[in-house]
Image: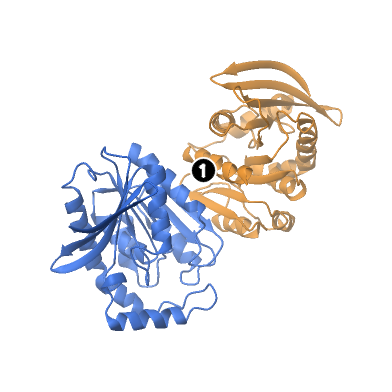
Chain colours: A blue, B orange
Amino acid sequence: MEILEEVCEKGVIERRFDLTVNGEVVPGIHWLPEAVTVPHPTVLIGHGGTQHKRVPNVLGLARTLVRHGGFGVVALDAPGHGDRMTEEQKRERADLLARRSGDRLAPLSERRIRAMSGVAAQAIAEWKALLDVLATNPQWAPGPFGYWGVSMGTAFGIPLLASEPRIVAGVLGLGALREGSEEVGQQAARITIPLLFLFQWYDELMTREGGLALWDAFGAEEKTMHINPGPHVGIPLFERDAALAFYRRHFDG
Amino acid sequence: MEILEEVCEKGVIERRFDLTVNGEVVPGIHWLPEAVTVPHPTVLIGHGGTQHKRVPNVLGLARTLVRHGGFGVVALDAPGHGDRMTEEQKRERADLLARRSGDRLAPLSERRIRAMSGVAAQAIAEWKALLDVLATNPQWAPGPFGYWGVSMGTAFGIPLLASEPRIVAGVLGLGALREGSEEVGQQAARITIPLLFLFQWYDELMTREGGLALWDAFGAEEKTMHINPGPHVGIPLFERDAALAFYRRHFDG
């Protein structure tokens, strides 16, 4: 993990780093509480499709968790996102964003879903490599670890949480079981850590039935689904505080 | 409002009172923060069927809201409940509780639903009379007012919130739209204050479809549905903290 830059703003250290995993450079950010020198929990944030490690909702959530929870937070650019986009991926992203209609995103194409599935294993390997590195510094990140990721962050988060015992609490959302997604349902059933699942009632990309079925499929004994009105991009800001309270409850235990 | 007794325990004043409404005595409890002498918001708690103003979940919630929110809290015995039960109602209650199976309640009979509807108008008149009295003491209860009530507390809470402008935020739950309950749906549509709606996925008295349809019917722009696994009686304790955060957000605004 190579630290490229460090700034501090309003009590939050922001450390830009590159992590090399299987020969590929993965750019990331590590946010840390300035005032805290004792070990503290760390939350991994998986951004959504077309987003990157420092979009406003990731940055806002990270700062909330650092300032009010005293946690560390790490975000990585997912494969094909942020600083990792090829020229072709940049054109595809611009095209996709241009096809938005008001606050509604362009429908998920089968091609995009396949592309996401194709890099899921890579994204998971990168999160696991990050945990290996973080754990070598007991002052900053001895755990426990949490995960937060909605939409694509949930598409990658489900197989991650199903296979990563170092993560003890997860916030997922904006995901749904689809026709033919039996494997996702099976992975969901293997997740037994406490979950908070965020869903939008007027999500233009996910069906209500599929969202409820995904929540229902999770193997966790403690799992709460928060449904709010509004489209895919539009989770209310107060759900950040709900996530903070959720992590606090489980990191303390 | 006649105050019959006052005790103070761990920072919470508990004041037993009788309120006379339309010639009938309504027993209630007013919980207040011991340390606070400034005006503060007040939450009305409507208990569930077979319960009363001081069952453990009401008392626990009241103490949480007083201690951590600095709010006042009031609970009333609903018509035919608590100290207002006739001998026949006591026998009916004992019979109903005897018909529980493990943690599952006996099914709601048409007769009980009719009995509840029959006293809804009376219960609402009593809450409104209470608000009239509370408002005469600006030190303790100038408002804003919140409401918390699930199950029967929601059956009464929906028409109350639909017609009572002094209540600015409501926590409802364990309710569902039923065949022939168009009037409830219409009342729900008239509720535009922020709502938190608590639902249990394995509720033996309410259907999932009906619960989702009720939440969907609320006219509020801000409305969040929290779904947890478990039976009718079994809302997780952490939802008390969610209610506290919800009231804080809206009372501050």
Question: Is disc 1 surrounded by few (<14), some (14 to 19) or many (20+) residues within 10 Å?
Answer: some
**Quadrant of the drawing holding the N terminus of chain B:** top right
Question: Foreground residue, A62 or B198?
Answer: A62
Q: Which residue is mark 1?
A: B242
Q: Number of labelled discs?
A: 1
Which residue reaches farthest right? B23
User: At x 57% / y 57%, what residue is drawn?
Assistant: B212
Which residue reaches farthest left? A23
Residue A81 shown left or right of residue B59 in the figure: left
Type of amino acid under label 1? Ala
User: At x 21% / y 41%, what residue is drawn?
Assistant: A139
Is A249 placed above or below A170 here? above
Is A85 placed above or below B250 here? below
Residue B106 shown left or right of residue A9 in the figure: right
**Any part of residue A145 in sight:** yes
Residue B65 shown left or right of residue A180 in the figure: right
Q: Position of residue A172 (x, y in %)?
A: 39, 57
Is B19 placed above or below A81 here? above
Q: Quadrant of residue A91?
A: bottom left
Secondary structure found at label 1: helix
Q: Position of residue B158 (x, y in %)?
A: 70, 48
Q: Residue under mark 1: which chain is it in?
A: B
Question: Foreground residue, A211 or B44?
Answer: B44
Q: Quadrant of residue B232?
A: top right
Q: Position of residue A175 (x, y in %)?
A: 41, 64
**Any part of residue A191 in sight:** no
Q: Quadrant of residue A142?
A: top left
User: At x 54% / y 46%, what residue is drawn?
Assistant: B204
Q: Position of residue A107 (x, y in %)?
A: 45, 78
